[in-house]
Image (spheres, coloured by chain):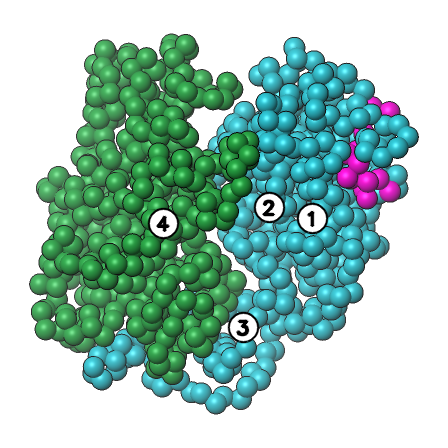
Amino acid sequence: MEFTRRLLIKSAGLGLLAFGLPPAFLLRAAEQEKGPRQKILVVVFQRGGMDGLNAVIPFKDRSYYSLRPSIAIAEPAAGEERAIDLDGFYGLHPALAPLKPLFDKGQFAAVHATGSPDNTRSHFDAQDYMELGTPGVKSTPDGWLNRVLMENKTESPLRAVALTQRLPRILGGAAPALTLTSIEEFRLRQSLMAPAVQKLYANVKDPLLRQGSNSLFAAMSVLRKVETGLPPAAAEGYPNGRFGTSLKEISRMIKADVGLEIAFAEIDGWDTHVNEGGATGQMANHLRELAEGLAAFFRDLGDRMEDVVLATLSEFGRTARENGNRGTDHGHANVMFIIGGKIKGGKVYGRWPGLDPAVLYEGRDLTLTTDFRAVCGEVLSRHMGRKNLKAIFPGYDFSTQPLGIIA
Amino acid sequence: MTTPLTDEQKITHLLSRISFGATPADIEKVKSKGLFPYLEEQLHPEKIPDPVVEEKLVKLKTVRLSSRELLELYPPPQQAKAMGKEVSPTQAPRYVVLELQQAKLLRAVYSPRQLYEVMVDFWTNHFNVFAGKGADRWLVTSYDRDTIRPYALGRFRDLLLATAKSPAMLFYLDNWLSVSPEADANRPRGNPKPAARQGINENYARELMELHTLGVDGGYTQKDVTEVARCFTGWTIRRPRGQPEFLFDARAHDRGEKVVLGARIAPGGGMEDGVKVIDLLARHPSTGRFIATKLARRLVSDDPPAPVIAQAAGVFRESDGDIKEVIRAIVRSPEFFSPEALKAKIKKPLEFVASALRAVGAETDVSPALLRYLVRMGEPLFLSQPPTGFPDVGSIWTSPDMLLTRMNFTIDLTANRIPGTKVKNAETAAELVAAPEFQRR
């Protein structure tokens, strides 16, 4: 067997590994100066289809209460477990209370009856359409957040980061984007081997591997500085779990000026077919996690929020009527949240189509009055300074009047 | 003049192409048998006993169950909840896909039918179905076992027809919803969603030509897409989440005349309209070229030399799409054992992980911890969302976070830190798999 072992080693293209290398192989990469403050867009995807009608409640639309006998949120009045009045027509779900102060300061806006115009009720298709940015067209090769990166290119290895296990379709494409689940985990594992592995890859000639490992080591080196500069304990109030952690990590990268422009996070649990709950219960718990996370993020970033806009997306809303299991099924239009230090919040945007059964979409769902691409396009042009929205959302007609969410 | 490959190089190169990575035992075997006799042996997996994998698969009960049994035993969470059932993690639908992933990795690592497993993987990506799309969770197990595996080394036309009729594909590419516009009272039976699309759905028809047969530049028009979609109206599923079997629903079928790629399909037809399309597409010259190109990309290099493609496409046509013959043609081409082909490929994550485990002779129970490396490397098995499947070109697989996971996998493997996976001699293992060169085959 000795022959075959040698042959295997030879075919792998190496002789004996040099163990006992100097353990600290120092990198010179990523010694760049802090750049000018970037404008940053954070997208939070609520996978599963949030029930927007129970998040921002149209309590003055009386059909709302007849459609939802057991899960409706009571209209605003004194006491707990009722909608929180926003403008005399809409109210916030009580679990979203942490966002009310931001609304009052004009730093939180909602857009109602928005979403993707395609009528699919498949999670998979609807998420695809929303991430590709081309409702009804599946063959689009890249995600719209990736196309945002294409307009002007920078060198930062941490320009676009998804806090996910694998790159989501919304960020897939030609522009480089990283995924990481936590800053601390984005490193080579401690072991005797690690320095040798790092040295081997740092000196690799293979062009494909070289490109990847150069950016990798640059990103790792930046993240090590983030760690020493801003230890995670500094941030408080984030909810436990993946979503809270994701926002916390995004905040650390923003504060450390690593060149982040696009960040992406996810929050799950919105597919509430059964026992959705009302003011309390299943969906209320998810809304609380969302609101606490967003409020903590805002607090944590302080005046840096002036450079940040955070937008939520969810593939579709849910049926206007509750179903036989005290839940709701896959529907159509939904609500989006926009948060930022300099937005024109304190308002629920979008035209309300009404919940009268005669005007429901396909007889069952909230009708769409604002395309999500109009909202995202406005954020991209007015906040991110993108000029070519047509390239980001091909096929969409941007001639409609902007909502005016971004000053 | 380039130097021809040495005998040793030929052995390791052949194994790098027709297996998930060489083991010392494989090398001995090819040495004693000869290159082409070994290929012939691999082309007949039914004659290669595989007791190790059989024994290891015993534990993975779901891979033997029908889609209907899987739906009963691993019900959708909302259904279970509505029935007041407590669902443990091992009864969740997720578990079905997990066992299928485990079975696939087990076979890649341990099966002596290596070329067969390589081809099963190839066709699984070519005819991709995303196990995360709705009812497909319960359908991919049968898709792997009953649709892909029986035909992976058979005739392309039979494989194509099997995928066209498979509930997994019908659901994934929406053909089960596609009905003749005239048949408005005839929506697929048992469809619980009143708002499901009515009329023709072109999704399958388009991907059938673009991805499964002709290729994007294969010479079809939008009109052909619509006509093909009309031919497949009525090819549906009895009930995706209850009776997940193929059904031809004559009431939903468009009985009018169609013209596909210039060929007339007479009015009044039924299910045979779709079969005629399959026959037409399977034998179209563009299909031969497209399949030959993709096979050469798997077996030779990302950008395979034109003569190999031409040769393989010719054999595809002459042999009426005999997959074995096409593989023989590629491996026997002068370009196959050329210096340009040596180490020309970056391993896909599955190839990288399996080849590392094989090279070091690891013992593994393919725990979820091991599968997680594949997720972070970008290849969660059976979970490619787009219909293209996982790509077979190196540039996709070398992003910084993917490379980091590859490095950490090597470190964890050789330090014996992957739960359920053991290597005997860590130092030897490190020599084999730690270097960047091991990322290539």
User: Image check: B299 left or right of A300?
Assistant: left
Instruction: State the residue at coordinates (38%, 72%).
Output: B422
> Which amino acid, by three-letter code, is at mark 3?
Leu
Are discs 3 and 4 located on one and the same chain?
no
Question: x, y (%) of residue A209?
Answer: 44, 68
The answer to whether residue B262 is above or below residue A263 is above
Chain coloured green in this rendering: B
Q: Mark 3 lies on which chain?
A: A
The answer to whether residue B133 is above or below residue B292 is above
Point out the image quarter for the N terminus of chain B.
bottom left
> Which amino acid, by three-letter code, is at mark 1?
Leu
Are discs 1 and 4 located on one and the same chain?
no
Reading the image, the residue beneath label 3 is A188
> Which amino acid, by three-letter code, is at mark 2?
Leu
Asked whether disc 2 touches disc 1, contact meaning CB atoms under 8 Å apart, the reply is: yes
- Location of residue A25 (image quadrant): bottom right
Point out the image quarter for the C terminus of chain B.
bottom left
Q: Which mark is residue B100?
A: 4
What shade has chain A been given? cyan
Instruction: State the residue at coordinates (52%, 64%).
Output: B400
Within 10 Å of the Cα at label 1, are there few (<14), some (14-19), or many (20+) other Cα atoms?
many
Question: x, y (%) of residue A110?
Answer: 76, 34
> Which amino acid, by three-letter code, is at mark 4?
Leu
Question: x, y (%) of residue B396?
Answer: 43, 56
User: Image check: B172 left or right of A110?
Assistant: left
Which secondary structure lies at badge 1?
strand
User: Image check: B436 left or right of A233?
Assistant: left
Q: How far apart are marks 1 and 4 (CA)?
A: 38 Å
Q: How far apart are marks 2 and 1 (CA)?
A: 9 Å
Q: Distance between the residues labelled 3 and 1?
A: 29 Å
Q: Residue A41 carries which label?
A: 1
